[in-house]
Image (tube, helix red, strand yellow):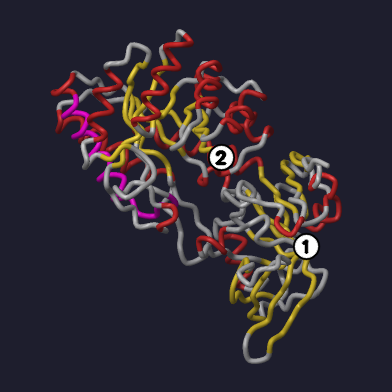
Amino acid sequence: MSSLSLSRVQSGIFPIETTVDGGGHLTIGGCATTDLATQFGTPLYVFDEATLRAQCRAFLGEFRSRYPETDAVYACKAFINKSLLRLLNEEGMGLDVVSGGELHAALAVDFPPERIYFHGNNKSRHELEQALQAGIGRIVVDNLDELALLSQLATELGRRQGILLRVTPGIDPHTHHHTTTGITDSKFGLPLASGTAAAAVRQALASPSLDLLGLHCHLGSPIFELEPYAEAVEVMAKFAADMQRECDFRWHEFSPGGGFAVQYVLERPAPPPAAYAQTIASALRAACRNHGLPEPRLIIEPGRAIVGRAGVALYTVGEVKDVPSVRTYVAVDGGMGDNIRPAIYGARYEAVVANRVTAEDDALVTICGKYCESGDVLVSDILLPQPRSGDLVAIPTSGAYCLAMSSQYNANPRPAVVMVRDGQARLIRRRETYADLIAWDTD
């Protein structure tokens, strides 16, 4: 096997149960990707069950070993599916939902509502009523208007709802500006600097229908640095102490959010769960000591870090177009319709030719999609075995946000999704059909 292909397969960007069989075929969860493509067609997203479970256990285990009073809630916006929700429930995870649709999906599989946290910067009246009627554990309040509306609705329904306040701490996590959420100039949260967060604490404590249990912040995603978390913990603890002195606020729960990074390319590894756990747990204990606070229950919100590595996208090569002295374009049967991240974030990925992993990496190519946009490029300037029409291309670390942000652009159906384990594959989302594309149109 060529050293570069071997490095990609063994680097930690593919699922943990990824191998190359004797025929040079990429194998995930005991299933040859060539067989999966034949059985289910392409584009195809493959999720490895072993990796999903291992990531859930890693985050819960690493945090609880350092800070026993920790809960992990999965950020559903990364990818949501009924089979995945059942798996998360089995692994003892909670859920972070950001819409009525995500909440509906969770309730449809009987996910325990008390383990659901409802986020979002513009929750509708209907969504808040839906959450209250479902009896979910926490609503994470984003702004003063929502706080007033939630108090009113809870009163009308005769409920006392547990809430956290989402505070904007004014910390830059040094990630892409589209996914930076902890700075003061953000559509999310109650700004600390302006006094809005303090006003929200006073307003929440004054409402008999709301039970203010703690504070939340979220800095952005993906965050490769550890220091922003420690800084955020200190800022939030100081604010909690100030509010305790001013208005007898009690800090029972605290969430530093999520944003935990995953490795997409060889040259940029991500911190392991243990590193995030050590930083956050030690910072929280120190901050509580320094400010005379009891240690709150800790809630973390991994999303990308649970599903990112577990998912691999499979595509079939169509046209190979050589532009002399410029580049070679390798067009596949998917693209920005199932993975828009490179187009909007400049996201970078690795790739392998899944049916010829052991071939020599002898061609510098750019993998592009089939959509009518010049920006429809999945991987730029990657060294691979010279791709041929009919080859199978695998792009790892595709489990997070690709499917969640997929579209029917150019009237292309969205791909099927399978879960693999112990050599068995099961369809967990069927491929859309042309009939699906027009199913909601009216005459």
| Quadrant (top left, top right, bottom left, bottom right) of the C terminus | top right
Q: Position of residue 97 (x, y in %)?
A: 52, 33
Residue 275 in view in this figure: no
Question: What's the amino acid at mark 2?
Answer: Ala
Residue 214 in view in this figure: yes
Vertical placement of residue 155 versus 125, above or below: above
For residue 54, the mark is 2
Vertical placement of residue 323 versus 13, above or below: below
Q: In the picture provided, is 239 more to the left or to the right than 103?
A: left
When asked about the image quadrant of residue 392, the answer is bottom right
Q: Magenta residues?
A: 221-243
3D distance between C-alphas at marks 2 and 1: 27 Å
Q: Position of residue 57 (x, y in %)?
A: 52, 35
Farthest residue to the top: give it: 158
Question: What's the amino acid at mark 1?
Answer: Gly
Element assignment for label 2: helix
Q: Residue at x 28, y 28 (%)?
A: 200
Q: In the picture provided, is 390 more to the left or to the right than 231?
A: right
Vertical placement of residue 141 versus 350, above or below: above
